[in-house]
Image (tube, rainbow, N blue to C red):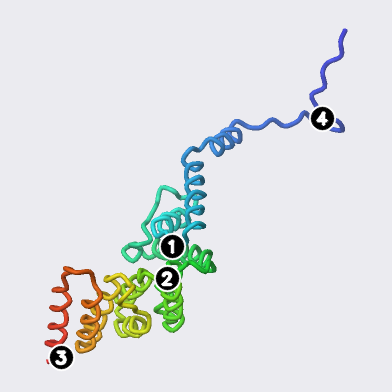
Amino acid sequence: MSEPIDSTEPGSTEPAPRESGTERSADVQEADDPLRDGLRQAEEALRTRLDEDPNDQQAFATLARLVSVGAHYEELPDPLTAEELPADQRERINTAVWALADEYVGNSRAWYPLVQLARLSVNEDREAALRRLKTACEREDSGVALFESLQMLRRANLPGEAMQLGVGCWAPASHIPDAGRQLVRAACEAGRPAEAQSLLDSLIENAPEGEDFTDLKVAIQDAYAARG
């Protein structure tokens, strides 16, 4: 008669424990979660895009959304409208944006991460925020960084600081007209219509032929009227 087969491991007097159905189900679910796998692949693709261009705003915003939710991928708030979110979600997404910007800011071509760090720090450390914006503008030649920086400062109700940054960085002959537009509007909001007019004259002189500046002329008139 053959000997019974011993199912115990060497040195063990008890049969090896079997994996429960619950544990197997959890492992299978983890391994076969297509949404989690898809998000992981999407994150890798977005990081590749940012490695190639750290100023890819769409990739930055989308990756910040993924990082902010972590495992809770049913919630994907938009970092560009974070101020409209409830406080807990806003804090979470701002933390994700800060971490992501800090990760890429060391790239000598990166200016957009600097703008994001400045946006998040301007209320606590204005001087540091302005230094970040100045560095961002120095890293970019077309004026897009200046446009984003001035727009951010105006939205923060800091037109005087926008003027300070813009006057030092604006190159009307080589920068996009929108950068000059932001600067003119900042001068109007700062209650300096004469300077706004001078800036507008430079902008018109260097802008493409046929561009309409009626809105800025009206803004300057309103700024004069506000002074009485």
Identified at 48% across, 37% down, the residue is: 34
Image disc number at residue 227: 3
Residue 190 at what x, y percent from top left?
Answer: 25, 85
Against 45, is 140 above or below?
below
The quarter in which the C terminus is drawn is bottom left
Instruction: Pick whichever of labels 1 and 2 is earlier in the sequence.
Output: 1
Q: Nearer the viewer, residue 55 or 16?
A: 55
Front of the two marks 4 and 1:
1
Q: Which residue is mark 2?
A: 140
Q: Which residue is mark 1?
A: 55
Residue furthest to the bottom:
228
Q: Given the image, on which type of amino acid does mark 4 rest?
A: Glu
Kindly report the distance in space between the C-alpha atoms of the residues bearing marks 4 and 3. Answer: 91 Å
| Left/right of residue 194 with respect to residue 60 in the rendered view | left
Look at the numbered discs 1 and 2 and tell me whether their residues touch, using CB distance below 8 Å: yes
Instruction: Pick whichever of labels 4 and 3 is earlier in the sequence.
Output: 4
Residue 55 at what x, y percent from top left?
Answer: 43, 62
Front of the two marks 2 and 3:
2
Q: Which residue is mark 4?
A: 9
Residue 67 at what x, y percent from top left?
Answer: 48, 56
Q: Nearer the viewer, residue 141 or 155?
A: 141
Instruction: Pick whichever of labels 4 and 2 is earlier in the sequence.
Output: 4
Q: Given the image, on which type of amino acid does mark 3 rest?
A: Arg
Q: Given the image, on which type of amino acid does mark 2 rest?
A: Glu
Instruction: Pick whichever of labels 1 and 3 is earlier in the sequence.
Output: 1
Identified at 88% across, 7% down, the residue is: 1
